Amino acid sequence: MKDLKRKHSIPGKIYVIGTGPGSVEHITPYARKAITHSDTIVGYGTYMELISGLLDKKEVFSTGMTREIERCRKAVEIAGTGKTVAVISGGDPGIYAMAGLVLELCKEAGIDAPVVDLEIIPGISALNACAARLGAPLMHDFASISLSDRLTPWERIEKRLDASASADFVIVLYNPKSKGRTAHIERAREIILKYRTPETPVGIVRGAMRENERIVITDLSDMLRHQIDMQTTVIIGNSSTYRWKDFIVTPRGYERKLGSDGRDG
Amino acid sequence: MKDLKRKHSIPGKIYVIGTGPGSVEHITPYARKAITHSDTIVGYGTYMELISGLLDKKEVFSTGMTREIERCRKAVEIAGTGKTVAVISGGDPGIYAMAGLVLELCKEAGIDAPVVDLEIIPGISALNACAARLGAPLMHDFASISLSDRLTPWERIEKRLDASASADFVIVLYNPKSKGRTAHIERAREIILKYRTPETPVGIVRGAMRENERIVITDLSDMLRHQIDMQTTVIIGNSSTYRWKDFIVTPRGYERKLGSDGRDG
């Protein structure tokens, strides 16, 4: 870091790369190419295992899940020595993930080059993957809310739950429950039930598109009977969302016009 | 369609496939494999051209942009004859796109098989791609709102703008403006300005990750001076979002703790 601060620029390059839901099958060719072009790969153990086939002959810096700040600092530091560094993020680094942290740490390092050579490469996020596995819940406006109050006051989270429920957004819940926080998902459900019926469809997805995937389609009334943890994403329908066979579908609009001429109504 | 109704099942299979921002570089290997395995490919002209390299020896059914219902009906009909059909969607079919329409048309066709052989394959949506090109605007809770009132009453859209602005969501605007609707984006900005300062960062992205990409980083005060149309996605920061060099960054939380021990605060 000292070196970086003295130089006030990054001679190297940082890629922040999304590897999607898990297996290499869901990593875009563009992301794969960026990994191949990098000298050093920085990431969390589990995600690194999933892409281990791409890491041959690479310098690798891997740490446990909670040490993300340490990993990203390391990436900025290594880029400061002129190397190309890939920071690996599961899902999409742009959605509640590494992109912001890397940028915050670049800023903290006092880089004053007018252009920082940093590229965010998007991936399939939990939101995209879970929606796909449930059918079509996100055909209309939606709000994405993390129930983790580690860095956000709980009152603000409650306000967002209330606002999004009252305005009939489909609601995507990230980090719905951890061992230390079991009441948040209960409270979220209570708030949403002020505005929606108990029959409102709810999808609960864990490990979307991975081998251990688990999909539950239920409703607001019954959702708490199912296992929910930090690896789970919960999607709650709007007032028009319905269940059909194994799917949850949110219609594209409120005035349903499936015109017979093949044109949109 | 008659055939389908008589049989009440789909003997074939439907894939609804997201091809991401445009070029084949951003299509996942999994999506590519599904295209390869399909007998018939159904899609909108422009997206089909972008993946033309994958369409060799395929039966292709392609129509103009507004004829999406016709295309999806055709897909359901062809699957009814026992074929495997790929419905191609730009971006992610699960976000304001084809997934819901295909499911609605399957339902309309009266399929009564308990399991419909239909798979949604997610792609990089405009939301993911635009966020990546802007830096890290979606590090915290966000709301996605389409400003098109073609199928949704405008009052409902205004209510959502107000609710999401008041609860400090980052706001992603799809379909911000068309030739017939130029006032919606102005009204959206007015509503958001009730709750946020004129200096709130705004990102305007057109053709993200394509050759003709255009990225503007501006603020609520100046945003209307820039070109905005139906191909544009607009992302408006929350109260903590800031500009740093070429980027927009939303901090991960409201209590900023970049702990020196490498652990999250």
Image (cartoon, coloured by chain):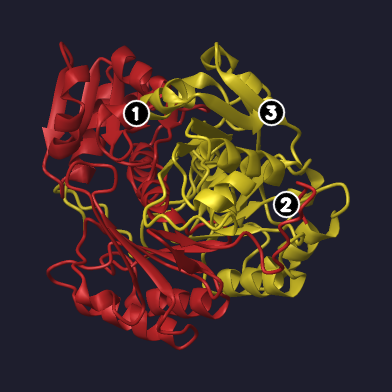
Chain colours: A red, B yellow
The answer to whether B121 is drawn above or below residue B254 in the figure is above
What label does residue B62 carry, if any?
3
- Foreground pick, B140 / A142: A142
Q: Secondary structure at mark 3?
A: strand
- Report the amino acid beneath label 1: Ile
Residue at 80% across, 48% down: A261
Separation (CA) of disc 1 from disc 3: 27 Å
Look at discs 1 and 2 and give the one toward the viewer.
Answer: 1
Along the viewing direction, whichever of B76 and B130 lies nearer the viewer = B76
The residue singled out by tag 1 in the image is: A27
In the visual, does B17 lie left or right of B68? left
Q: Amino acid at mark 3?
A: Ser
Vertical comparison of A217 with B32: above or below? below
> Numbered disc 1: what chain?
A
Residues behind callouts 1 and 2 on a single chain: no
Q: Position of residue B51 (x, y in %)?
A: 57, 20
Q: Which residue in the structure is indicated by mark 2?
A: B176
In the image, farthest residue toward the bottom = A194
Q: Which residue occupies the extreme front position in the image? A: B6
Which corner quadrant holds the N terminus of chain A?
top left
